[in-house]
Image (spheres, rainbow, N blue to C red):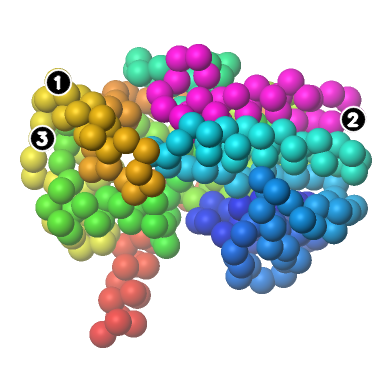
Amino acid sequence: MKVLITGARGLLGSAVAREVVGRGHECVVVQRNPCGVPGVTEFLDDLTDPQFSQQWIHGVEAVIHLAAKVSVTGSEHDFQRINVDATRDLMEIAQAEGVNRFIYASSPSVAHTGKPLIGADADPADPQHTRGHYSTTKGLAEQIVLAANGPAFATVALRPHLVWGPGDTQLVGRIVQRAQSNRLFLIDGGQALIDTCYVSNAATAFAQAVENAPRASGRALMVTNGEPRTVKETLQRICLAAGVPLPSRSLPHSVAMLAGSAVERVWGQRESDPPLTSFLVEQLSTAHWFDIAETKKLLDWEPTISIDEGFRLLAESYSLDNIQVS
């Protein structure tokens, strides 16, 4: 197939592009900055105001839409414009061109209202009760995408959870940076169980969704490793892989929540990441792990890199970086 991928510059997007190319599909990518993935046809464009859509959508049979505004701060208008309006516009462009498969990168946070999620299925998106502009707008976009599903236009929403791996500047990079500056801590001892997903496992799920879209059409599906670990273990193993200090402090949930709420009020709509938010406190102290049985069945997919192997590969990448620097 000819597959269009938006947002191929990030950790997940570049991995998805490499996976799609590796399977023999023709791959077109669109984002604002070069992604550097070999074997793709690349267009630099802004999905909120595309200038070359007739060129990059021509002949495309399937779309994987990964591009989004991912942040805990920023204006509601920007999140709406990028995550909702641009998704709706892209879908309309795709339908007009005759694209028949549309895979949307959603988020588990679209159905997370602050309560523990234990072995949870992909419950319907609930943008009325989500936490923050990111989760709300991703939920609204997911609803729009799944509502467009039909016999000639199969839509699927995948919800990858906490994707990480070598080269990750988001989850891993931020944890390492905080540990280096002695700003990494646990909440209630870090005993909450959480799911994560190694990046290559997430990439194969998206590629499988393209190939199996008709039987998964109209569905939201969870994408994780299926190996929940405590927050404490997850943070410690990332720190050990990177060779940085382990978190040594723990705050009570009530104290952390008060601090997060106070920081949010002071921080306002700045684009930089605040040191703490109430949403981050929830994520670090509330169990959230998911049942991926339906994902495995409908996509004919299985995670192939275990959590333990992932941490080994992460440590290896830091060792190689240290060798190159020295």
Q: Earlier in the sequence, mark 3 or mark 2?
A: 2
Asked whether the viewer can see residue 302, the reply is: no
Q: Which residues are magenta?
A: 127-155
Q: Badge 1: how crowded within 10 Å, few (<14), some, or many (20+)?
A: few
Q: Position of residue 163 (x, y in %)?
A: 45, 45
* Residue at the image position 66 percent from the left and 34 percent from the top: 85
The C terminus - image quarter = bottom left
Residue 186 appears left or right of 150: left
Nearer to us in this view, 267 or 188: 267
* Mark pair 2, 1: CA separation: 50 Å
Above or below — where is 189 with respect to 29? above
Tag in front: 2 or 1: 1
Which residue matches tag 2? 152
Residue 243 appears left or right of 131: left
Residue 96 appears left or right of 194: right
Which residue matches tag 3? 250
Q: Position of residue 134 (x, y in %)?
A: 47, 33
Which residue matches tag 1? 254
Q: Which residue sits furthest bottom? A: 326
* Mark pair 3, 2: CA separation: 53 Å
Q: Position of residue 49 (x, y in %)?
A: 70, 48
Residue 176 appears left or right of 102: left
Q: Amino acid at mark 3?
A: Ser
